[in-house]
Amino acid sequence: MSVGSPEKLESYFGGKWSRGDGVEAELVDPVNGSVLATASARGLDLKAALQFARQNGSPALRGLSFAARAKLIGAIADVLVTNRARYEAIAIANSGNTRNDAAIDIDGGIGTLKYYARLGAPFADARLLVDDKPARLTKAENFQAIHILVPRRGVAVHINAFNFPSWGLWEKAAVSLLAGVPFLVKPASATAMLSHAMVRDVVMANVLPAGAISLLCGSAGDILDHLTGEDIIAFTGSSATAIQIRRHPNVLTRGVPVNIEADSLNAALLAPDVMPGSPTFDAFVKEVVREMTAKAGQKCTAIRRIFVPAGRMDDATEALKARLAKVVVGDPRREDVRMGPLVTRAQQTVALDGIGRLAGEASIVSGNAKAPALEGIDPEKSSFVAPTLLRVKDTTTARAVHDTEVFGPVATIIPYRDEKDAFALIARGGGSLVASIYGDDRVFLARAVGELGSMHGRLLVVERSVADVHSGHGIVMPQCLHGGPGRAGNGEELGGLNGLRFYHQRVAVQGSAELIGDLQAKAGHLH
Ligand code: NAP
C-alpha cells in the first residue's frame, strides 16, 4: 500500500462514480492508526440510484437465462482472481488481516462466486424455478397447481458488516445475480476499501449489464425511505442495527422483505466420552484456538462459549492455554505473526469492555482486559486485544457469558454436569449461527443433534474420522445454510439453490395440466 494522502472512496450508481460531501468516516490502518481513506455518501441521490438499478439492471438480468447469469458470476470471479494480490495488501492494511485472515475473506468470496457459477450453469435456458410437483385440486385430472419462483423486480440492498468486506459482498452478490436481481451493496464504512477496490475492478472490466451492480460508500443515509415492496434488504451486522432496520417505518409499511444475519454466541461442546490426549480432544483444542484467533476473533461464527464436562475442566483449560500461548500477536505484515489487531480502536474499546463484563463472573485464564504491550507497536494508536480465555466460576449465576458477544479473540470455558445441563446451558445463547460438537459416541452425537438443532442454523459434528478433514466451525460453506434462529437474526443465506428463494416471489399457479406441464418443462428445478 502506498502512503500518501488518504484515498476518497467513491460510490457507484446510475452508471457513474460519485463522491459525497465532506468526510463521514475515516478508514485507518489498525496497526498504527494512519488514515488510509475517507468515505462519505452525504448528499448523494440514493432514490435515483435505486431507480436506475430497477429500470436497467433488473430487466437486463431477468432477460438472461440462469446459465447466462452464471457466466456473469464466473466472469466476476475471474476479475477478482486477476487482482488478488492487491486485495490482500488492502486487507492487511485496512482490516489488520494476516495473510491467512485475508484468504478467508478474499478466497471465501471468490470461492462462493465460483460455486454459484457452477450451480447455475446446468439450468440452460430456464428463467423461472419450480419448487414442487404439480398437485391435483379437484376431481378433474387436468386442473392442477404448482408453485413457481419468479425473480423480484426491485433492487436487493445488501448492507454488510465490517469483518468481511469481500466474502460478505460476494456471497450475497452471487445469489442475487443468479436470481436475476440487481444489487446495491453498502459495505461497513470502517473496512470499505476492499469492497470499493473489488467493485471498481468489476465495473472497469465491464462484465455486468448497466444497473446490475451499485456501491454505496459512506453511511446508509435515507436509502431505506426509498425502498418499495419489490425491493429486498439483506443485512449483516449487529442486533442493534438489525432492529433499527426491521422497525424502519417505510420497511414496515411497504412490507419490504428483510433477511438478518446478526451476532451470536456460538458454542463448542466437548462430549462426555472424550478423553484428554485422544484425537478428538486434540481436534477440539485445535479448533477452539483457531476460532478464537482467526481474524482476531472477528467472525460472526466464531466460538464464544466452550462447554466442557466438569471433570475435564482442568485438562481442557491447560490444553487451550498452552496452545494459545503459541499464537504470535503483532503487525500482520510480519511473517511470524499469527494474529493481528481488531479493525478499529472503537472495536478494541468495546471488546475490552466486554472482557471486563465477562470477568465479573469468570476468571481470566490467559489474556487481559487491557491492550497488550507489543514490541514496536504504539498502544495509543493501535487496536490490539490479546487472545483471552476465561473460565466461568458458577454456571448457575453466570449471565453475561450467554448474552455478551465480545467481537474479538475471546472465549469462555463453561463446565457442565451432564448432557441435560450442557444442552440447557447452550440454549441460554438464545439461538446461534453454529455449534460444533466433538465426540466419538454416535448415540450421544445423534441425541445432541436432535437437542441442539432447533437453536442453530448449522451443526458441525467432529468425530475422530473427520478430525483432519472437516471444513471448520467458523467457515461458511455455500452448500450449507448460513443463518440462525433467535438472536442470530432468524435469517437464511446460501445453502445452494435454496439461497435463491429470498430473491424470488413464490407463486401458486392454478391451471390446466398442459399449462403447468409447459411451465415445468421450461423451468429450472429447485430439487
Ligand atoms: P453494525 O454496526 O450493525 O453495522 C453493519 C452495517 O450496517 C454497516 O454497513 C453499517 O454502516 C450499517 N448501518 C449502521 N446503521 C445503519 C442504519 N441505521 N441503517 C442502515 N444501515 C446501517 O455491525 P458491524 O459492527 O459492522 O459488524 C459487527 C457485527 O456484525 C457483529 O455483531 C457480528 O456478529 C455481526 N456479523 C454477523 C454476521 C452473520 O453472518 N450473522 C457476519 C458478520 C458479522 P456503517 O459502517 O457506515 O455504520
Image (cartoon, rainbow, N blue to C red):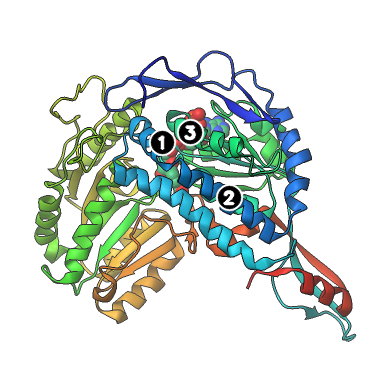
Q: Is residue 182 visible?
A: yes
Expressed as whole percent of the image width and height from the top left, the position of residue 425 reads 31, 59
Please report the residue visible at 58 percent of the width from the left and 30 percent of the height from the top.
216
Q: Nearer the viewer, mark 3 or mark 1?
A: 1
Tag 2: residue type?
Answer: Ala
Q: Residues within 10 Å of mark 3 (few under 14, many from 20)?
A: many
Q: Earlier in the sequence, mark 3 or mark 1?
A: 1
Q: Is residue 162 above or below residue 382?
A: below
Q: Is residue 218 above or below residue 173?
A: above
Tag 3: residue type?
Answer: Ala
Expressed as whole percent of the image width and height from the top left, the position of residue 291 reads 28, 52
Query: In this figure, which residue is indicated by the disc labeled 2?
Result: 75
Q: Is residue 105 above or below residue 96?
A: below
Who is closer to the viewer here, 335 or 497? 335
| Tag of residue 188 | 3
Tag 1: residue type?
Answer: Arg
Q: Name the secondary structure under disc 1.
A: helix
